[in-house]
Image (tube, grey):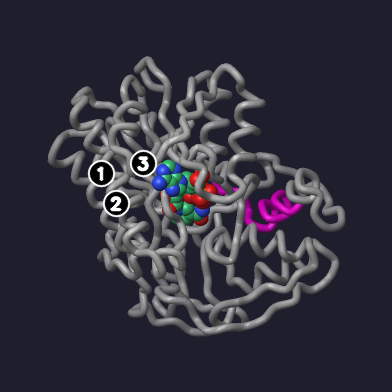
C-alpha cells in the first residue's frame, strides 16, 4: 500500500474501528502491531478474533498510549501509524476529565513525539471527531416530523464542511480537538506526514455499543434483546451514519495519498444521503425486528448536537471514496451479524451487501 517496509502500527486495534482496520490491513498482506490497553470491556474478543484469522500477521502489544516508552518502542520500525486508541465517551470525560486528557491528548502527543524523533517521514492517520465543531447551536433548524432540518438550503444539501470554525465542548471535545490540532501541527511544524479524520457516527460489526458510546449498535443490541432504550433529548437529533467498511477504506486511502493530503483534516461520515434521526433509526430497527422498540425519554446530554451531518465532498474527491453503504442496508447487516455472531434476538433476513446496492 505504500513503498515502506515494516509493520503497520494500529493503536486501539482491539476496538471497533481498529479491529476492522487491522483485519483489512492483514488481509492486504501487512504485518500489524495491534497496540491496545484493552480498557474497553469486551474488546479482548475482537483481539482474539484478529489473532485467529491472521495468526502470523497480528502482533498484539498490550500497552497504554499514556506510556511514552511503550509507544516509542511500538512505533520503532513501523511503516505507518493509525492512531485510534482513545477514551471514547463524552459522558466518561465529564466525570474523569484528567484521565480523558491523559489518554486522548498526552497519548497522542507521545505518539507524535516518537515519530518526530524518528524523523523519517512515517505517516500517521488520526481518528478525530465531529465534536471538534461544538454543539453547532447557531445552525438554525426546523423540526419536521421526526427530524431536525437546517433552514439554510446549502447546509441541508451538503452538511457541515471542514472550514467550519472549531469550538470544543466537553472535556472529550477538548482532548480530541486538542489532539486533532497537534496532529495537524506536527505536519506543519515538523514535517511529520499526518492526516485527520473527523468522524461522525460509525457503526458495524465488532462494535461494543453502549449508552455512552456507539449508540447505533447499542440501539440494535437492546432491541434484539427486547430491552427498552433511553433517549436523551427528543430523539429528533440527526446524524449521518457510516458503515465501518467505508470508514476503513477512507483510512487506507488517506495513507495511500499521504503525499497529497498531509497536514489536512477530512470530515468522514455517511453524508446527507445517510442522515437520520434517532427516531427514524428506531423505527427501522423495529421494522427489522418485527416489533416496535420500547423507548424512554430523558434530558439532553452535555454538548449534544441537534444536527450534525458531514459534508463529505472533500473526502470523497481527495480520497476517491466510493459511495457509502446505504444506511438501511448497513443497519440490517449489523442486526444480522449480531444475531448470527452473538446469538441475539430473532432471525433477521440476511441483507445483500453488493456494490450495485450502493448506487
Ligand atoms: N465510533 C465512532 O462513531 C467514532 C466517532 C468519532 C470518533 N471516533 C474515534 O475513533 C476511535 C476509535 O473508536 P471506536 O468506536 O473504535 O472505539 P473503541 O472504544 O471500540 O476503541 C478504542 C480502543 O482504544 C483502547 N484504549 C482505550 N484507552 C487506551 C489507552 N490508554 N491505551 C491504549 N489503548 C486504549 C480500548 O481498549 C479500545 O479497544 C477513537 O479515537 C474515537 O474517539 C469514533
The residue positioned farthest toward the left in the image shown: 189
Q: Where 15 falls versus 252 (above or below)?
A: below
Marks 2, 3: nearer the viewer: 3
Kindly indicate whether the residue at mark 1 contacts the one at mark 2 (C-beta within 8 angstroms): yes
Mark 1 vs mark 3, foreground winner is 3
Q: Is residue 63 visible?
A: yes
Q: Position of residue 159 (x, y in %)?
A: 42, 64
Q: Which residues are magenta?
A: 323-335
Assess mark 3: CB under 8 A from ligand 1?
yes
Report helix, strand or loop for mark 3: loop
Please state if 290 lies on the left or on the right of 196 as rendered: right
Question: Tag 2, which secondary structure?
Answer: helix
Instruction: Depth check: give the residue in front, 228 or 243.
Output: 228
Q: Which residue is mark 2?
A: 105
- Vertical order, 51 against 88 (above or below): above
Decide: few, some or many residues near mark 1? Use Cα within 10 Å; few <14, some 14-19, many ≥20.
many
Mark 1 sits on what residue? Answer: 109
Q: Residue at x 14, y 36 (%)?
A: 190
Is residue 330 found inside the magenta-colored segment of the image?
A: yes
* Residue 156 image offset from top left, x and y in percent: 45, 70
Q: Earlier in the sequence, mark 2 or mark 3?
A: 3
| Frontmost residue, 231 versus 290 | 231
Quarter placement of the N terminus? top left
Q: Nearer the viewer, residue 43 or 200?
A: 43
Determine which residue is flagged by label 3.
65
Give the main secondary structure, helix, strand or loop, of the magenta stretch. Answer: helix
- Residue, x 64% and y 61% (percent of image)? 218
Amino acid at each position: 500500500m505504500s513503498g515502506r517496509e515494516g509493520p503497520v502500527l494500529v493503536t486501539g486495534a482491539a476496538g471497533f474501528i481498529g479491529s476492522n482496520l487491522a483485519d483489512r490491513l492483514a488481509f492486504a498482506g501487512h504485518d500489524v502491531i495491534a497496540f491496545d490497553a484493552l480498557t474497553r470491556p469486551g474488546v479482548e474478543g475482537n483481539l482474539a478474533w484478529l489473532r485467529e484469522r491472521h495468526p502470523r500477521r497480528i502482533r498484539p502489544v498490550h500497552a497504554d498510549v499514556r506510556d511514552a516508552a511503550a509507544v516509542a518502542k511500538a512505533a520503532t520500525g513501523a511503516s505507518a501509524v493509525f492512531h485510534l486508541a482513545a477514551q471514547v465517551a463524552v459522558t466518561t470525560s465529564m466525570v474523569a476529565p484528567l484521565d480523558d486528557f491523559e489518554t486522548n491528548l498526552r497519548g497522542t502527543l507521545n505518539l507524535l513525539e516518537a515519530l518526530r524523533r524518528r524523523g523519517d517521514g512515517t505517516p500517521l492517520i488520526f481518528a478525530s471527531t465531529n465534536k471538534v465543531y461544538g454543539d453547532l447551536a447557531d445552525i438554525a433548524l426546523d423540526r419536521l416530523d421526526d427530524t431536525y432540518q437546517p433552514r439554510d438550503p446549502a447546509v441541508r444539501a451538503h452538511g457541515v464542511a471542514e472550514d467550519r470554525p472549531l469550538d470544543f465542548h466537553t472535556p472529550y471535545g477538548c482532548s480530541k480537538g486538542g489532539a486533532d490540532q497537534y496532529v495537524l501541527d506536527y505536519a506543519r511544524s515538523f514535517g511529520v506526514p499526518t492526516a485527520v479524520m473527523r468522524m461522525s457516527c460509525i457503526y458495524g460489526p465488532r462494535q461494543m455499543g453502549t449508552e455512552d458510546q456507539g449508540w447505533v449498535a447499542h440501539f440494535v443490541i437492546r432491541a434484539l434483546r427486547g430491552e427498552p432504550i433511553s433517549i436523551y433529548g427528543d430523539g429528533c437529533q440527526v446524524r449521518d451514519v457510516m458503515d465501518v467498511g467505508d470508514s476503513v477504506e477512507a483510512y487506507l486511502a488517506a495513507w495511500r495519498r499521504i503525499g497529497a493530503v498531509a497536514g489536512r483534516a477530512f470530515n468522514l461520515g455517511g453524508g446527507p444521503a445517510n442522515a437520520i434521526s434517532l427516531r427514524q433509526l428506531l423505527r427501522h430497527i423495529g421494522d427489522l425486528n418485527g416489533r416496535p422498540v420500547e423507548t424512554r425519554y430523558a434530558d439532553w446530554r452535555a454538548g449534544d448536537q441537534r444536527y450534525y451531518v458531514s459534508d463529505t465532498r472533500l473526502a470523497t474527491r481527495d480520497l476517491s471514496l466510493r459511495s457509502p453503504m446505504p444506511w438501511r442496508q448497513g443497519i440490517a447487516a449489523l442486526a444480522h451479524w449480531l444475531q448470527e455472531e452473538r446469538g441475539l434476538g430473532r432471525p433477521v433476513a440476511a441483507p445483500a451487501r453488493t456494490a450495485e446496492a450502493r448506487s
